[in-house]
Each structure stands twice: as structure tokens, then as C-alpha cells.
Image (tube, coloured by chain):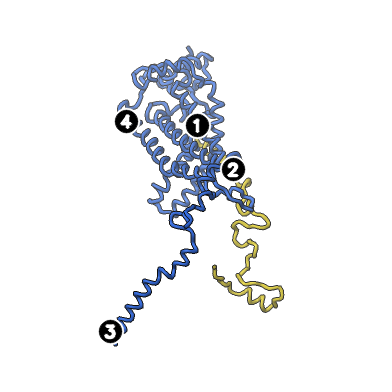
Amino acid sequence: MKAFAAAVIAAIALGVVAMFALTSNQTFAYQAFATSGTRVSEPGTNLVGPRWNGLPLLGDATAEDRAKVQGEASHPKRS
Amino acid sequence: MRRAVTLFSTLVLATTLLAAPGAFAPAQAQNPQQQDGMNPMGTKPTADSVNEEFLFKQADKITGRVSIPDRKSANLIQPQGREYRAFRESWLPWIGGLGILGMIAALGAFFMWRGRILTDDTQESGRKILRFNAFERFAHWMTATCFIILSLSGLNYIFGKRLIMPLIGPDAFGALAQWAKYSHVYLAWPFMLGVVIMVGLWLKDNIPNRIDWAWIKAGGGFLGKGHPHAERFNAGQKGVFWMVAGFGAAMGVTGLMMLFPFTLVDINGMQVMQVIHSLIGIAFIVGILAHIYIGTLGMKGAYDAMGSGEVDLAWARAHHDLWVEKEQAKTASGPQLTGRHPAPAE
């Protein structure tokens, strides 16, 4: 019985060690397959940033315009 | 007046219906393609164009071009994937189901016919002899417990969505399948270690020899009443040992190929690995079912060898007489015998 209990405990312990070893060796797809020009998945960190609301932000826009742009997100039509 | 309006409307409709084909005729004339791919000149302009059949003569899959680092995403059409899917979804469940249920039915029929294999009492009954020491039992049980979890979680890959999901629903099955996958991937490591340890421990006692052939010819004691001679392991146990060593190695190698995808093989190679892994896995389960049967229900006294490690001396003499003689010849005090009831050395 002692040998059986020790075997079960050892199996679980080795499994946990394997879990940490394998997890430390893995990267998410959006990290492994991303370049400076592309982002794969990971919502919120795409090229336009997490606060993009779909409206254009021109270079000569005033602070008031920018405040408007930061308002409710628009829903641009897809062609 | 009303009749005049009705008559006029009918004339307009009739004129429209008659004139419509003529109105669209110029548009049709602009399109030289006909229904069968022939243009008005009687030639087929797409006859020499690149098509799927032509591309498959160049390579076994059709690929495009991508700019992201994951070049595998450029795969467009890969026919082997369809063959793999057909095996995975239609052949594999039948092979697995028939194999496992067939073995359970065969063991049940054997038990009904032969019953439990018993050992006749002798004057040595009641004395114990150490069959497996603590480390041997530790290695066996570590491998065995992992094997059971790996088997159940592996079968869940094949049968889970067919048998369990309709019973418990997709949400509960999703959580179950996720934990089954974790256990399959992580407990594979102590399993592989256990197989390596067992091979190291018992290899020298499992080399086939002439005694095994005589044991096989005598039916191994299953068919008749007597027990043929055997050393520490009889031919049947040696078969289990080599099955565990061979299948364990094959499962380990093919499993590692899938655990580290695209490291040594591509997607086709991993599909082949999955086919091998699943087929050997089913054969492994079928073989171990017979091992569990004979080690528990099928033979009285057999479980003690891996339970407490000590077996009845009369049982050992009946099933492994050559091994008992060798152990008792080692020393007069019998280090392999328990202190309370030492069996006399011969």
C-alpha cells in the first residue's frame, strides 16, 4: 500500500513538474507569430490601440475635436 | 373605360415579355463565355489555365504566400487532411470500440468457461516469499496509475463527444475534456519514466528462452490443470513486458511529436503520428485489459505479487517453480523470504 501511495504521489508531483516545464517553454500565438507590421489576435493591443473608436483623427484637430472622437464608438459600414 | 384600361395593361405586359430577351441580347453578346465554357469561336479559353488538378501534379498540397512569420498559414488545400479526418471520424471509433469491447467480451467468456484459476494447497501454503520489492512495486504502480488516466483521457478524444457530451452537455464536457487533456499531456511524463524504470529493472528476467516455448506449447496452465515450468516471468508475462516496452516507446515517441508540434515533422507527419498513436493506444489498452484480468480476477493469489509484494510459496512454486528454486538456493536463511515464516532452503 505504501508503494502504491508513493507511486501516486510521485506521478502527481512529476506531472506538476512537467506542467511548469512545458508551460515555461510556450508562447502565445500572438507573440510567436507577430511582426512589427502584423498582430495576430490579442484584442486591445492591435495597431490602432485599445481606445480606437473608428473615427479619423486628423493632424490639425483641436482638443475639442479629439474629445469628440474619444466619445462613443461609431459603427462604420462595411462595403 | 375599365375594360379599356385592362386591355391596355395586358398589351403592355405582353410587349414587355416579348421584348425582354431582345433587350438583354447585346449584354449576352459581350460575354463570350457559354454554359459549357466554349466561347462563340468554338474554343475553350480556360482549357490551359491553372487548376486544382494541375497544381496537385506539382506538389501534394496547394499553398499561397503570407507575410507573417507563421508560414504554415499559407497552406490552402491539403488532401491528406481529408484522409486523416475520415480515419479520425469514421474508422477510429469503430476500431476502438470493437477492439476494447471485443476484449472485454472475450475475457468474460473465458471467465465463464475457465473460472478463476486456483492453486492447490500444499504444505508450503501459508508461507510467503517476496516476489517484488518496494521499488519494483512503486515503478509498476506509478506507470499503471498514469496508464489508466492516459487511457481514459485518450479514449475521451475518440468517444467523449459521442458518448459523454450528450449526457452531461457541452459546457460540462468542455471542462472535462480540458482537464482530461491536461492530465494526458502532463501524466505522460511519469508514465514514460515508469516504462524506462521497469525496462531497466526487469529486462534481464524477460529475455525469451526455450522454457518459454515449452510454456506456450503447454498452454501456460490456462488450458489444462497442471502448470508448466517457469522462471521469474513466464512467456505470457514476458509478452506483457515486451508489449509495454514496445508500445510504451512507440506511444512516447509519437506523443512527443505531437506535444512539440512542427519540431521534427510537419502537419502531415503529425497526422500520421496521431494515427499511429491512436491505433497503438487501443492495442495497448486491449492488451493491458487482459493483464489486469489475469492479475486480479483471473488468478487467485496473483494480485499479492504487486499488492503486498509477497506471494504464497505454494502459489510461487506452482507458477514459477524454477524461480523459487533459484531464490531458495541463494542462501540458507533466504533473504527473499519473510522473517515470520521462512521457507526452508532446498
Q: Where does label 2 land, which residue?
A: B262
Q: Is residue A56 above or below residue B116?
A: below
Residue B232 rendering spot, x and y as whole percentages:
48, 20
Label pair 2/3, CB-CB below 8 angstroms = no
Determine which residue is flagged by label 1. B247
Task: Assess disc 2: are there few (<14), some (14-19) or many (≥20) residues with their C-alpha within 10 Å of its C-alpha.
Answer: some
Mark 4: amino acid: Ala
Judge if badges 4 and 2 mark residues of a common chain: yes
Real-space Cα separation, disc 2 to disc 1, in angstroms: 23 Å
Which is more N-terminal, label 1 or label 3? 3
Is the C-beta separation of discs 4 and 2 under 8 Å?
no
Q: Chain of mark 3?
A: B
The part of the image, by quadrant, that contains residue B213 is: top left
Answer yes or no: is residue B185 visible: no
Q: Nearer the viewer, mark 2 or mark 3?
A: 3
Mark 3, Cα crowd under 10 Å, few <14 / some 14-19 / many 20+, is few
What is the secondary structure assignment of the residue under circle 2?
A: loop
Q: Is residue B228 above or below residue B83?
A: above
Chain letter for blue, please: B
